[in-house]
């Protein structure tokens, strides 16, 4: 067999010594193809306003905590769950036994969908909404009974409650809702979850709860502590900007936590544990993230107003805008301008979900919108 030297091997893998030499320093490493041209990933090639990520993260404190955790990455992580669970319990005003760590709130959603969808379980919800739990329920034999959102693009709680029957194994409530960014009246939300939980399990997806600016808007976590049949999911992916690290948690009764724990499919990694713990201590970055998100939403509102486009006031890190153009067509036109925006949400296909970004991101999005629609 021909013996290759190191340079030939690196060239065959599309890597150069120069590219490798940037690893671990402040410079961004470039991926170089064998022909010498720079290879760009999707995140390099496009401004991503499609996945509701926090473009300002991670903070220095989170980053340094994750880097430090690399030294312990040879250890299995469950033994180190206790410290993070204790911090979460303090934040949520619950007991540590009420906290189940999951690999991003998506795992918690899917795990719950699997459990409550088995054996033909029915999930009641409104649509469009976030589908992680719903799709898993269907994959494992469950059915979905979804009513349309109301005229304000909010969950229709009255109609949902009327659908709850002996066949219903769970009610799914995403508040704030993805993709619309809407919330329901606070007292109505509490009354609905409290009442319906006497007949079936209620799942409250609160991934975007941190972005709600209404004072004293209720989380459904206190209902868990009152002994109600309620599960709440939260995540470090949004305001803390740890989407790529995958850390989330469920708040539920100790019995439910113990029942679900053996069914969890993956562990939170060492870097995620350290980063999430640091995130809960980083109030400065938390406030900064909320401010920059607020600024970006105001930018989107302003452009939508200029273009006479309807939009929904958002309680998340994205804005749902009615462009009047099918989102498939808009996506192609925006991609041609170097920007990726949200996917279709049936039946609202002439609406587009636009994630918030940096000032430069929003300026580029505005330029593209004016080019396409003016």
Image (spheres, grey):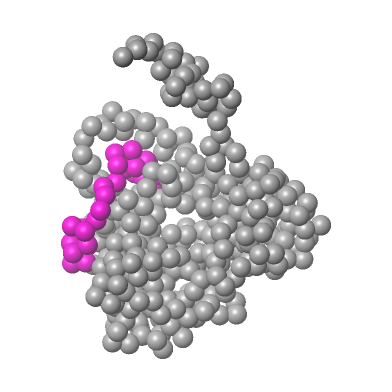
257 within the magenta span: yes
**View extreme (right): residue:** 374
Asked if one can make out residue 165 in the rendered structure from this viewpoint, the answer is yes
Asked whether, in this view, residue 140 is left or right of residue 52, the answer is left
Asked whether, in this view, residue 28 is left or right of residue 170, the answer is right
338 within the magenta span: no
Asked if one can make out residue 254 in the rendered structure from this viewpoint, the answer is no
- What segment carries the magenta color? 255-281
**View extreme (front): residue:** 1
Residue 6 point in image, percent of width and height: 39, 13
The residue lying toward the viewer, choosing from 230 and 311, is: 311
Q: Residue at x 59, y 70 (%)?
A: 348
Q: Residue at x 18, y 64 (%)?
A: 259
Quarter the N terminus occupies: top left
Residue 273 point in image, percent of width and height: 31, 43
Give the vertical position of 312 relative to 359 (above or below): below
Q: How many numbered marks does the figure carry?
A: 0
Task: State which quadrant residue 355 falls in.
Answer: bottom right
Residue 64 point in image, percent of width and height: 40, 32
Q: Residue at x 47, y 59 (%)?
A: 208
Give the vertical position of 245 relative to 33 (above or below): below
* Main SS, magenta residues: helix
Q: Residue at x 56, y 59 (%)?
A: 343
Task: State which quadrant residue 260 falls in.
Answer: bottom left
């Amino acid at each position: 067999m021909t013996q290759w030297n190191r340079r030939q091997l690196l060239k065959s893998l599309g890597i150069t010594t120069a590219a490798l030499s940037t690893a671990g320093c402040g410079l961004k490493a470039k991926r170089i193809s064998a022909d010498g041209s720079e290879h760009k990933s999707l995140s390099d090639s496009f401004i991503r306003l499609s996945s509701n990520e926090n473009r300002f993260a991670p903070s220095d404190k989170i980053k340094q905590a994750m880097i430090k955790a690399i030294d312990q990455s040879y250890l299995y992580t469950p033994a180190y769950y206790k410290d993070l669970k204790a911090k979460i319990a303090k934040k949520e005003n619950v007991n540590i036994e009420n906290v189940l760590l999951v690999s991003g709130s998506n795992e918690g959603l899917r795990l719950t969908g699997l459990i409550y969808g088995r054996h033909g379980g029915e999930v009641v919800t409104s649509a469009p909404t976030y589908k992680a739990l719903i799709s898993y329920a269907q994959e494992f034999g469950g059915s979905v009974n979804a009513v349309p959102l109301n005229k304000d693009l909010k969950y229709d709680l009255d109609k949902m409650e009327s659908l709850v029957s002996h066949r219903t194994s769970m009610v799914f409530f995403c508040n704030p809702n993805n993709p619309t960014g809407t919330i329901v009246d606070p007292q109505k939300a509490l009354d609905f979850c409290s009442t319906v939980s006497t007949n079936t399990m209620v799942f409250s997806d609160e991934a975007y709860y941190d972005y709600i600016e209404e004072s004293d808007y209720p989380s459904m976590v206190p209902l868990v502590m009152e002994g109600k049949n309620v599960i709440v999911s939260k995540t470090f992916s949004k305001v803390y900007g740890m989407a790529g690290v995958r850390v989330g948690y469920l708040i539920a009764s100790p019995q439910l936590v113990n029942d679900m724990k053996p069914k969890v499919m993956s562990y939170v990694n060492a870097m995620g544990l350290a980063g999430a713990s640091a995130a809960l201590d980083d109030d400065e970055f938390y406030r900064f993230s909320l401010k920059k998100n607020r600024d970006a939403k105001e930018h989107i509102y302003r452009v939508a107003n200029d273009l006479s486009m309807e939009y929904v006031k958002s309680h998340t890190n994205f804005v749902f805008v009615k462009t009047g153009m099918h989102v498939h067509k808009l996506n192609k036109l925006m991609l041609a301008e170097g920007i990726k925006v949200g996917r279709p949400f049936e039946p609202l296909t002439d609406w587009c979900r636009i994630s918030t970004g940096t000032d430069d991101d929003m300026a580029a999005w505005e330029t593209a919108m004016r080019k396409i629609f003016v």
